[in-house]
Image (cartoon, rainbow, N blue to C red):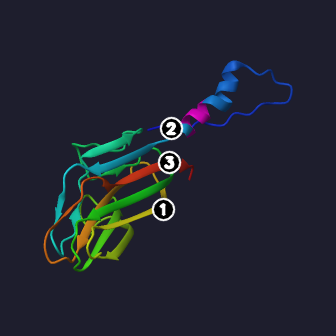
Amino acid sequence: MATIPATQTFLAGEKVTASKLTAATKTPLDFLFNPPRASVFITAGVPVSTGVTTLIPFDGESWDTDSMHSTTTNPSRVIINTPGQYLVSVFARFPVNATGYRQLTLRANAAGVATLGSAITAFTAPAVSGTSTFIGRTFELACNAGDYFELFAYHTAGTTLNLDFGTTTGMQFRWIGNL
């Protein structure tokens, strides 16, 4: 867990020391320039059967500054270690198929089950004819230490679709402020 630095105050007439100035400026700025954040993605296509809600396991990371994700233990989860307000992005690209619709659902504390925990956001888009269908959402979310988040995919294409891999399917969490 990252420690959110406490702000320092100076009293009138107080002598400014290096340690107090560091605590008042450098330490908070270091935290703000490198806040708790994680960016996870899939490194191979994840098959999603038509009409079946599928948990997405993330086996790749672009960055993780607060031990928020593991590629081996519960790789579907991003775990909040430092409480606060987070900027969250969830996104996926489905391959070319013009039938039906595509859906992503972000759930909190769901233990890998699409009907457990709390639905944070769910959004749906119609399939795009002639090209892949990309859907995503970015929003702010208040998070408590210990909360974890998982992403589920769903579609009605009539056949199994493999989610596009790489940084086109993933989740990002970035601490932006105190609760």
The residue that mark 2 highlights is: 34
How crowded pointer 2 is (Cα within 10 Å; few <14, some 14-19, many 20+) is rated as few
How crowded pointer 3 is (Cα within 10 Å; few <14, some 14-19, many 20+) is rated as many
User: Residue visible at 24% across and 54% down?
Assistant: 165
The residue that mark 3 highlights is: 175
Residue 4 visible? The answer is no
Magenta residues (range): 27-32
Tell me the element at label 3: strand
How crowded pointer 1 is (Cα within 10 Å; few <14, some 14-19, many 20+) is rated as few
Residues 98 and 91: in front is: 98
Residue 100: give its label.
none
Q: Would you place residue 130 above or below residue 14 in this image?
A: below
The residue that mark 1 highlights is: 139
Q: Position of residue 37 (x, y in %)?
A: 44, 44
Tell me the element at label 1: strand
Sequence-wise, which precedes: disc 3 or disc 1?
1
Amino acid type at circle 3 is: Trp
Residue at the right extreme, as displayed: 13
- The overriding secondary structure of the stretch rendered in magenta is helix
Amino acid type at circle 1 is: Phe
User: Residue visible at 55% across and 38% down?
Assistant: 33
